[in-house]
Structure formats: structure tokens, C-alpha cells
Image: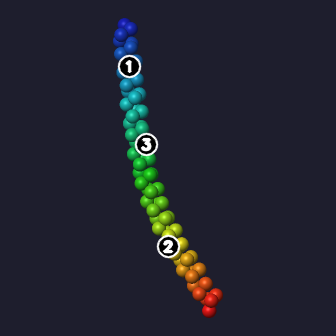
């Protein structure tokens, strides 16, 4: 084989590796975006839950204070 053909073959192999890497990274990116969406939804739910609990605790404190005064 001539040197040019060897270099072309090597370049072809490198391009194939690059394409494979791009596909893998694309899949990882897609998975990470889905995971981010799931975690964002979960966070929103937890924040909402926290707010409900905070309101309940404040309500209990208010009731306790009013019982204390009575």
C-alpha cells in the first residue's frame, strides 16, 4: 500500500471513531436531559410539600400561642 492509502485508511478509522463517539454522547445527553427533567419535577414536588408542611407548622404554632394566652 502506498503511504497515501494508509493515511486515508487511518483517517477513515478516525472518522468512524468520531461518529461513534458523537452518537454515544448524543445518547448520554438525551438521558441526562431526561434525568434533569425528572429531578426538576421531583424538586418542584418537594418544594410544594415543604411549603404545605411549613404552613401547617405555622398554624400549629399560632394555635399553641392562642391556647397559651387563654
- The residue that disc 1 covers is 11
> Can you say whether 6 is above or below 51 in the image?
above
- Report if residue 9 is visible in the image: yes
Q: How crowded is mark 3: few (under 14 residues within 10 Å), some or many (20 or more)?
A: few
The N terminus lies in quadrant: top left
Residue at the farthest right position: 68
Going from the N terminus, do you reach mark 2 or mark 3 first? 3
Task: Give the residue at mark 2.
Answer: 52
Which residue does the image show at 52% across and 68% down from the upper left? 50
- In which quarter of the view is residue 70 placed? bottom right
Compared across the picture, whether 46 is left or right of 1 comes to: right
- Point 39% across, 13% down: residue: 6
Q: Nearer the viewer, mark 2 or mark 1?
A: 2
Q: Label 3 belongs to which residue?
A: 28
User: Disc 1 versus disc 3: distance between alpha carbons?
Assistant: 25 Å
**Within 10 Å of the Cα at label 2, are there few (<14), some (14-19), or many (20+) other Cα atoms?**
few
Tags 2 and 3 in contact by the CB under 8 Å rule? no
In this view, the mark in front (2 or 3): 2
Vertical relation: 8 (above or below) 31: above
Amino acid at each position: 500500500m502506498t503511504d497515501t492509502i494508509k493515511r486515508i485508511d487511518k483517517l477513515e478509522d478516525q472518522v468512524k471513531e468520531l461518529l461513534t463517539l458523537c452518537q454515544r454522547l448524543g445518547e448520554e445527553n438525551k438521558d441526562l436531559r431526561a434525568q434533569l427533567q425528572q429531578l426538576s419535577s421531583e424538586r418542584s414536588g418537594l418544594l410544594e410539600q415543604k411549603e404545605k408542611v411549613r404552613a401547617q407548622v405555622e398554624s400549629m404554632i399560632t394555635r399553641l400561642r392562642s391556647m397559651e394566652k387563654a
